């Protein structure tokens, strides 16, 4: 099962990647946050591939990196250990008992289970590679 099928609102990602979003291998984590409402886990990271059909605004601005914020609402459990300033990890989403998210790399481990997952923000920026 592809990760995009577990999101309540995959339309934005599907539109820019022409229904074929990248796997979440080697993504750069920018933010992990928790909100009382929901309760909700927010995970913000760069997607590992340039989109097939970026918006004109992104092209005009010469944006070369897509960033997505996924929200996991109705948070049932979470385990987080380690963090850092340059986290590159594989993120996996599975659909057992709601939505499970897992990301593990050297010095970082995140595992959570929630009722639903959705895109809370989709943006792009010029990344000096």
Image (tube, grey):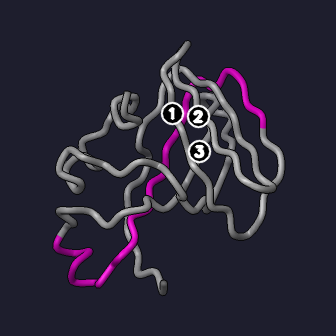
Left or right side of 119 for 37: right
Depicted 49 relative to depicted 36: above or below: below
Label 1 Cα crowd, 10 Å radius (few <14 / some 14-19 / many 20+): many
Q: Earlier in the sequence, mark 1 or mark 3?
A: 3
Left or right side of 114 for 63: left
Q: Is 58 contained in the magenta span? A: yes
Q: Residue 51: horizontal and vertical position, in percent? A: 27, 63
Question: According to the image, label 3 marks what residue?
Answer: 42
Q: Which element type, helix, strand or loop, lies under badge 1?
A: strand
Structural distance between the alpha carbons of marks 1 and 2: 5 Å
Q: Quadrant of residue 79?
A: top right
Q: Residue 60: horizontal and vertical position, in percent? A: 21, 83
The total number of labels drawn is 3
| Closer-to-camera residue (43/35) | 43
Q: Earlier in the sequence, mark 1 or mark 2?
A: 1
User: Which stretch did the figure color magenta?
Assistant: 56-79
Q: Do the residues labelled 1 and 3 touch (CB within 8 Å)?
A: no
Label 2 Cα crowd, 10 Å radius (few <14 / some 14-19 / many 20+): some
Question: According to the image, label 2 marks what residue?
Answer: 101
Farthest top residue in view? 97
Question: According to the image, label 1 marks what residue?
Answer: 93
Q: Residue sitting at 55 percent across and 54 percent down?
A: 44
The mark closer to the camera, 1 or 3, is: 1
Q: Which of marks 2 and 3 is nearer the N terminus?
A: 3
Q: Which element type, helix, strand or loop, lies under badge 3?
A: strand
Q: Which element type, helix, strand or loop, lies under badge 2?
A: strand
Q: Are marks 1 and 2 in contact (CB under 8 Å)?
A: yes
The mark closer to the camera, 2 or 3, is: 2
Q: Residue sitting at 22 percent across and 78 percent down?
A: 59
């Amino acid at each position: 099962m592809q990760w995009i099928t577990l999101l309540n609102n995959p339309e934005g990602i599907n539109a820019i990647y022409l229904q074929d979003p990248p796997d979440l291998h080697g993504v750069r984590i920018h933010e992990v946050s928790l909100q009382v409402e929901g309760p909700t886990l927010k995970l913000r990271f760069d997607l590992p591939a340039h989109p097939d059909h970026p918006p004109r605004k992104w092209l005009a601005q010469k944006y070369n990196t897509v960033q997505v914020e996924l929200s996991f609402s109705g948070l049932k459990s979470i385990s987080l250990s380690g963090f850092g300033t340059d986290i590159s990890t594989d993120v996996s989403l599975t659909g057992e008992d709601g939505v499970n998210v897992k990301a593990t790399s050297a010095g970082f481990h995140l595992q959570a289970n929630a009722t639903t997952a959705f895109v809370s923000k989709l943006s792009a920026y010029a990344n000096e590679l």
